[in-house]
Amino acid sequence: MKELIHILKARTAHPNQPFALATVVRVEGGCRHAGARMLIDIDGHTVGSIGGGSVQNDVIAKGLEVLVSRENRLMSYDVLSPAGAASDATVSGRETVDVLIEALLPENAWSLEPILDQILHDGSPLVLGTLHGKGETGLTLAHSFLENDEEVLINFLNPDERRHLKRQMREVAETGKSQSLCYGDSAHFVELFLEKVVPPPELFIFGTGEDVRPLVQLAHDVGYRVTIVDHREEEVDPLRFLEADAVLHVKPHHILEQLAFTPRSAAIIMNHCHETDCELLGILLPLKIAYLGMVGPKKKTKKILQELEQNRFSFSPQNLEKLHAPAGLDIGSESPEELALSILAEIQAALSAQRSASLREHVVPIAPEPFLPRIRKKSAMLQAEA
């Protein structure tokens, strides 16, 4: 989502300038990310990335050609080739990356823009579809859509195909795994790339000490929406935290009135003040959030929990499970920057519901599972349902 936001900002900042948008719509083998995007301007400058290397360099060159021809293209790259051999996509090989390159022209509306606005405004994950097709004159369309975009889909899919598509979109929403679908034949086909787009995660940092600054910087770079909160008005200085989305003066007893938490929110207490930390923990621990951390020794948190219990606070095992104190992974952190890295890594693992372990310990491949071949007479799944 961070990449999409940056692309949206670049596009809206220059509404009279043409761009080419490259989207990885299919991955078979390799470790590139389906859904990765890159915006290319007329000077070859880019926003976002589709993985770097020779493939990205060639996509930039092809993007400039698209800006001249104003004709969308679908490129297929052999990820095992040292040169990343490219061709206009027809029949996919076993180890390929397919990249859709579309022209975003000033005179035409960008179908993805209102969808991104909706995702950011609603704050809820949505399944995004990227539709492209081939006719007698080559690649004839490129359009983004949501599940309820009947006006778009009715022009390209019959009723059975639309029902099948809606089922697959629900599956993507539940599993989070991208899918590539195709309807038609090698001469005329419509392909749909489905992905789950999740709004940026929110990180609430309580405290304004010097150890907060590297965490704010790192979280911003990763793509979090960062809100800093302090109960002391004299300590609230937005100029000290330029990368934060908000720096707020909020008393602990007003937190639930002035801040909006979601199940994807993360919060970290970094006040280093026993009384304030005790009050904050009593407020934040019952919330349904993904992560709650506290900086400081374990005995400090134990003492605070005991004091809260003496004041008739009670917490469920689920509440205590999400509490990470001391906050952070054990990576030998000493400096504030190292501590920020360990904390954010732990937060990311909590949001992704992943155990923090070395990738070399994985017994299953981390690369995406291959998609079904793109060109086929009919979707195999659709035929099975017939």
Image (cartoon, helix red, strand yellow):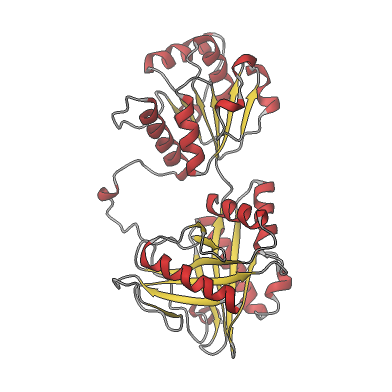
Q: How many labels does the image show?
A: 0
As drawn, 382 above or below 79: below
Front in this rendered view, residue 338 or 344? 338
Q: In this view, does 352 lie to the left or right of 288?
A: left
Tell which of 56 and 331 is nearer to you: 56
x and y, in percent, of residue 339 in the image:
38, 28
Q: State whether residue 348 is above or below residue 149.
A: above
Quadrant in the rendering for residue 168: bottom right
Kindly tell me whether residue 322 is visible in this rendering.
Answer: no
Q: Residue at x 65, y 17 (%)?
A: 251
Residue 345 lies, in percent from the top left, at 40, 38
Q: In this view, does 239 lie above or below 265?
A: above
Q: Which residue is drawn at 39% across and 34% down?
A: 341
Residue 97: percent from left, percent from top: 41, 70
Q: Which residue is drawn at 66% across and 81% down?
A: 158
Quarter residue 289 falls in: top right
Task: Quadrant for the C terminus, please.
Answer: bottom right
Q: Which residue lies furthest to the front in this view?
A: 43
Residue 185 visible in this rendered orientation of the protein: yes
Can you say whether 280 is above or below 177 in the image? above
Relative placement, left or right, of 7 versus 323 is: right
Residue 277 placement (x, y as % from top left): 52, 15
